[in-house]
Image (spheres, rainbow, N blue to C red):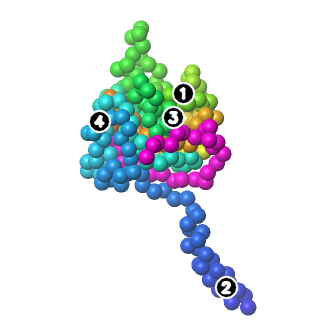
Amino acid sequence: MKPLLALAVLALVVSIRPVLADDVPAFRDLFNGKDLTGWVNVNTAPDTWSVRDGLLVCTGKPIGVMRTEKQYENFILHIEWMHLEAGGNSGVFVWSDPAPAAGRNLPKGGEVQMLELEWPNLNREKDGTPRHRGYVSGELFGAGGLIVTPDNPRGARSMSYEYRCKGKGEWNTYVVVCVDGVIKLSINGKFVNGVREASQRKGYLCLESEGAPIHFRNIKIMELPGGRATPEQTAPVAPP
């Protein structure tokens, strides 16, 4: 009877495996490497964003964003980026509004900073000293009115506990985990920053154009089960 019982159990597992597999979160591409399907140019020029050799190419001009077509609540985002110029500036927004407020270039959302290593030296303080090096290693902060509590405060921002970003011409890998108002950031294989208690917990993802060319690749998302985002914590829905 034991062999028969084992076979019965095996048959049951095999029969329900497709159902279980459908419920297992998995990564899917947000960028297909061919065109900009799934993305909306919000407030930049028609040629700001393009696809070349399987890469998502951003000229950096003008300042603005391109966003996803849909909103996301709880998820894991994998994104790889590379600056082409010293001091390049960019970022990815999570839980973002569909568009900036009037008179602004960038929307309300949680910004995950992407700066080239020379940015502090090329953008010095008024007294000539370099800006704080926290700028170049994945700072996290609320932009456009979004409020967060930083894990490692530098004012209202959270700076990474460890400098891990690479300079121009080198690829960086970010893994951004966003769950119930918490954002955690891994830079090149290690979690080094975080914020919590975000005032907005469901919204769009945006890629930022901010003055310098940047390339993106391998943009993938794993959607996780929904959490406790209230209507007040959800970004407005973009008009059709």
Quadrant that contains the N terminus: bottom right
Give how far apart the Cα atoms at labels 2 and 4 are.
62 Å
**Looking at this view, is 171 or 77 the one in front?**
77
Q: Nearer the viewer, mark 2 or mark 4?
A: 4
Left or right: residue 236 versus residue 230 is left
**Label 1 residue SS:** loop
From this view, report whether residue 108 is shown above or below residue 2.
above
Q: Residue furthest front?
A: 240
> Per the image, is 235 magenta?
yes
| Residue at screen point 38% across, 47% down | 39
Residue that badge 3 annotates = 109
From this view, report whether residue 179 is shown above or below residue 135.
below
Q: Amino acid at mark 2?
A: Ala
Question: Residue 15 placed where, x, y %?
Answer: 60, 79
* Residue 18 quadrant: bottom right
Give how far apart the Cα atoms at labels 2 and 1 are.
58 Å
Which mark is on residue 145? 1
Q: Amino acid at mark 4?
A: Ala
Q: Which residues lie in the magenta part?
A: 215-240
Binning the other alpha carbons within 10 Å of mark 1 as few (below 14), some (14 to 19) or many (20 upward) gives few
Q: Earlier in the sequence, mark 3 or mark 2?
A: 2
Q: Earlier in the sequence, mark 2 or mark 4?
A: 2
Q: Amino acid at mark 1?
A: Gly
